[in-house]
Image (cartoon, rainbow, N blue to C red):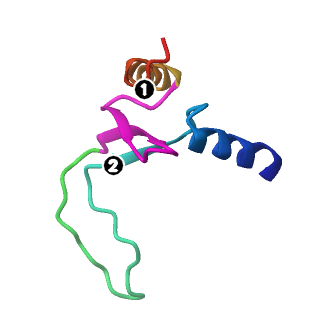
Amino acid sequence: MNSVLLPLKDSAKRGADHLFFVDATHFIHRVHPAYVWPGKRVFIKASSGKRRYNVLRSLDFATKAVSATASYTCINATSAIDLLNKLLPEYDLC
C-alpha cells in the first residue's frame, strides 16, 4: 500500500495530481439503541419506517476541501458519477 499511496500523496502535495478520499454515510430516521440492559425491556418512541438519507462525500487530501452529494435513494454508481461530475468543474478536470 505504501508503494502506491505515498507517491500519490506526494504528488498531491506538490499540486501535480488530485487525491480524494471518498466515503458514504447512511443516516436512518429512527432510533436504534446501542444496547439494552439484560432483563429490562426498553421502549423508545420513534417514527415508523426506515427512510435513509444517504450522503456521499469526498475529501481532497491536499486542500482538505469537502464535496458531497445526498439523496434518499441508495448510493450506487450513479451517485458516484454525480459526485465526480460535481468535482470536475471545481478542480478544472474537464
Q: Is 93 or 48 nearer to us in this picture?
A: 93
Q: Choose the circle earlier in sequence order: 2 or 1.
A: 2
Q: Looking at this rendering, what residue extends furthest in the front direction?
A: 14
Question: What amino acid is labelled 2 in the image?
Answer: Phe
Say what secondary structure mark 1 lies in: helix
The residue most toward the right is: 3
Magenta range is 50-76
Q: Which mark is residue 27?
A: 2
Give coordinates of residue 59: x percent, y percent: 46, 43
Mark 2: secondary structure: strand
How dense is the environment of label 1, judged by Cα within 10 Å: few (below 14), some, or many (20 and up)?
Answer: some
Q: Amino acid at mark 1?
A: Leu
Which residue does the image show at 37% across and 36% down from the upper left?
Answer: 67
- What residue is at 61 percent from the left and 31 percent from the top? 16
Q: Which mark is residue 93?
A: none
Q: Is residue 21 magenta?
A: no
Q: Camera-side residue: 7 or 34?
A: 7
The dot on residue 83 is 1
Magenta-colored stretch includes residue 70: yes
User: Relative to the observer, which residue lies in front, 23 or 15?
Assistant: 15
Badge 2: residue crowd in 10 Å (few <14, some 14–19, many ≥20): few
